[in-house]
């Protein structure tokens, strides 16, 4: 973006006014820590690892000014100045992530690569890739081609909340080829971002059942008549607890593990959330399975699913992580928990010795609306302002010291039922992701004592960076005319969100 010539570091002595950036590794630093020193001779960036060097380079880019975030130099040959400074910096948490749901609305590969760049610019290091749901299957599985031939496409889409009577009759879908996935994973690895693929089991499965009806509870419903779901909410069509289902998803996961190598993806997310048990209660096959396995009830049947894949993944050198419902019926040994329904699941898991990622819906679901005004597009959930996100605290009070050590970090989740394209995702994610990134990186005072006024002042500069990056963020004054969606039914929830 600068177009500036930089001297070759080999043998360069620099000198006053020299344009050189000196990179070095220092094993004494923490892995993602960095030092940045700017003096008359050079810019010196030192990292504990290459990841630390990258974080230091991102800070250097911030110091250069907003134009350094453009794709090409505005004025070749211009002089760039950086203030003399000395910075020592390292992250509070090792897991600083964002989930992106590409099932409810698909985003093309280039949009994913762009979001990896945006995560890196904000020093976030985990990309949770939500790849299957009732509304679409988004990753090519060669041994099961109908997952994308059938499961990646729906005939229409509800427009707005699930109670809306508006429909977009345009067929919607798409998927990533295996080469697309390899490219995404390699691109993330170059930016020291771990990718956590999610294959949801045993709920959120209608797209898979539409492609392969034998995966569903065919003794209860006509699974052959099911199509990829065109609406939102909790779907009753869940996987049948059969050996065939287990073998099918083992085959899926074998290809997933090849696409997401352990160096980049030590964790595999298996969902485990929002799995209604009604079909299992009515299914003679499921009831026979419960009796055969000596289980107490349908909750333990779901736990049996999770434990099976925990054992299967562990045998292949990976770790299972799932939504906090996997606590129900007994948590698989070694499994980690994404605590989404609030803090409670994460607290219980951490106190029991399990690793936890804190992502409570009430605080850091970025599909929730940013303001209570009438111009907000498709308003969902509680009002979560930029200041609210800045005052989010990932570690709840009262945890034992041992439990605190099990908090891997935190994650903001982006569910796309009401986000039809990249611009809508941008509007919901930014600027709040900047506040979240600071919370995830920095050791901050207690929420009530945080200097939001100072943060808001710094955001003035950051808005210019977002402009240079082409991000369609929500302006402090509210949505621009083309960002509004008047008259489209949402699901606003009034009042302050509970801390549960």
Image (tube, grey):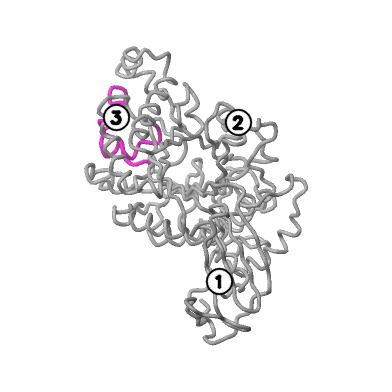
Q: Residue at x 28, y 31 (%)?
A: 215
Residue 361 pos. (x, y %): 58, 40
Residue marked by disc 2: 347
The residue nearer to you, when weighing 211 against 253, is 253
Element on which disc 2 rests: helix
Residue 252 pos. (x, y %): 29, 40
Whole-number angstrom distance, CA of label 3 to CA of label 2: 30 Å
Residue marked by disc 1: 468
Tell me which segment is drawn in magenta: 203-229
Whole-number angstrom distance, CA of label 1 to CA of label 2: 40 Å
Picture mark count: 3
Residue 90, numbered circle: none
Q: Residue at x 50, y 34 (%)?
A: 337
In reply to whether residue 56 is colored magenta, the answer given is no
Element on which disc 1 rests: helix
Instruction: Relative to 17, say whether 310 is above or below.
Output: above
Residue 246, numbered circle: 3
- The mark closer to the camera, 3 or 2, is 2
Instruction: Relative to 138, say whether 241 is above or below.
Output: above
Residue 126 pos. (x, y %): 49, 50
Quarter of the figure with residue 277: top left
Instruction: Relative to 458, say whether 389 is above or below.
Output: above
């Amino acid at each position: 973006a600068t177009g500036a010539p930089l001297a070759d570091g080999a043998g360069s002595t620099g000198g006053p006014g020299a344009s050189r950036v000196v990179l070095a590794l220092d094993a004494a630093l923490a892995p993602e820590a960095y030092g940045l020193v700017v003096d008359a001779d050079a810019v010196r960036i030192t990292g504990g690892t290459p990841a630390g060097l990258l974080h230091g380079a991102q800070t250097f880019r911030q110091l250069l000014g907003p134009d350094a975030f453009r794709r090409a130099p505005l004025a070749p040959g211009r002089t760039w100045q950086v203030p003399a400074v000395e910075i020592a910096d390292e992250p509070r948490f090792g897991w600083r992530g964002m989930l992106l749901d590409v099932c409810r609305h698909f985003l093309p590969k280039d949009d994913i690569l762009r979001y990896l760049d945006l995560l890196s610019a904000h020093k976030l290091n985990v990309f949770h890739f939500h790849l299957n749901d009732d509304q679409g299957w988004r990753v090519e599985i060669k041994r099961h081609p109908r997952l994308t031939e059938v499961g990646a496409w729906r005939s229409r889409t509800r427009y707005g909340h699930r109670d809306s009577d508006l429909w977009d009759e345009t067929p919607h879908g798409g998927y990533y080829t295996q080469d697309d996935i390899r490219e995404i994973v390699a691109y993330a690895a170059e930016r020291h971002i771990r990718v956590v693929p999610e294959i949801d089991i045993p709920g959120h499965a209608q797209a898979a059942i539409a492609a392969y009806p034998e995966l569903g509870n065919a003794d209860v419903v006509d699974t052959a008549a099911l199509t990829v779901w065109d609406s939102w909410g909790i779907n009753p069509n869940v996987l049948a607890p059969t050996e065939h289902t287990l073998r099918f998803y083992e085959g899926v996961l074998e290809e997933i593990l090849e696409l997401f190598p352990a160096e980049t993806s030590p964790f595999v997310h298996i969902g485990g959330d929002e799995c209604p048990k009604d079909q299992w209660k009515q299914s003679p096959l499921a009831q026979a399975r419960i009796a055969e396995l000596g289980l107490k009830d349908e909750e333990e049947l779901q736990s049996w699913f999770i434990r099976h894949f925990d054992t299967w993944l562990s045998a292949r050198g990976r770790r299972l992580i799932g939504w906090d419902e996997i606590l129900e019926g007994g948590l698989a040994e070694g499994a980690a928990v994404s605590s989404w329904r609030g803090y409670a699941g994460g607290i219980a898991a951490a106190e029991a010795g399990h690793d936890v990622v804190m992502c409570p819906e009430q605080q850091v679901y970025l599909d929730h609306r940013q303001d209570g005004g009438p111009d907000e597009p498709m308003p969902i959930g509680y009002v979560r302002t930029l200041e609210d996100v800045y005052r989010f605290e990932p570690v709840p009070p009262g945890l034992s010291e041992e439990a605190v050590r099990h908090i891997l970090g935190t994650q903001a989740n982006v569910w796309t039922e009401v986000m039809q394209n990249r611009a809508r995702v941008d509007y919901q994610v930014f600027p709040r992701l900047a506040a979240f990134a600071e919370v995830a990186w920095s050791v901050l005072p207690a929420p009530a004592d945080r200097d939001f006024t100072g943060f808001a002042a710094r955001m003035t500069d950051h808005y210019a960076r977002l402009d240079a990056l082409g991000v369609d963020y929500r302006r402090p004054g509210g949505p621009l005319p083309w960002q509004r969606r008047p008259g489209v039914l949402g699901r606003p929830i009034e009042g302050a969100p509970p801390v549960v």
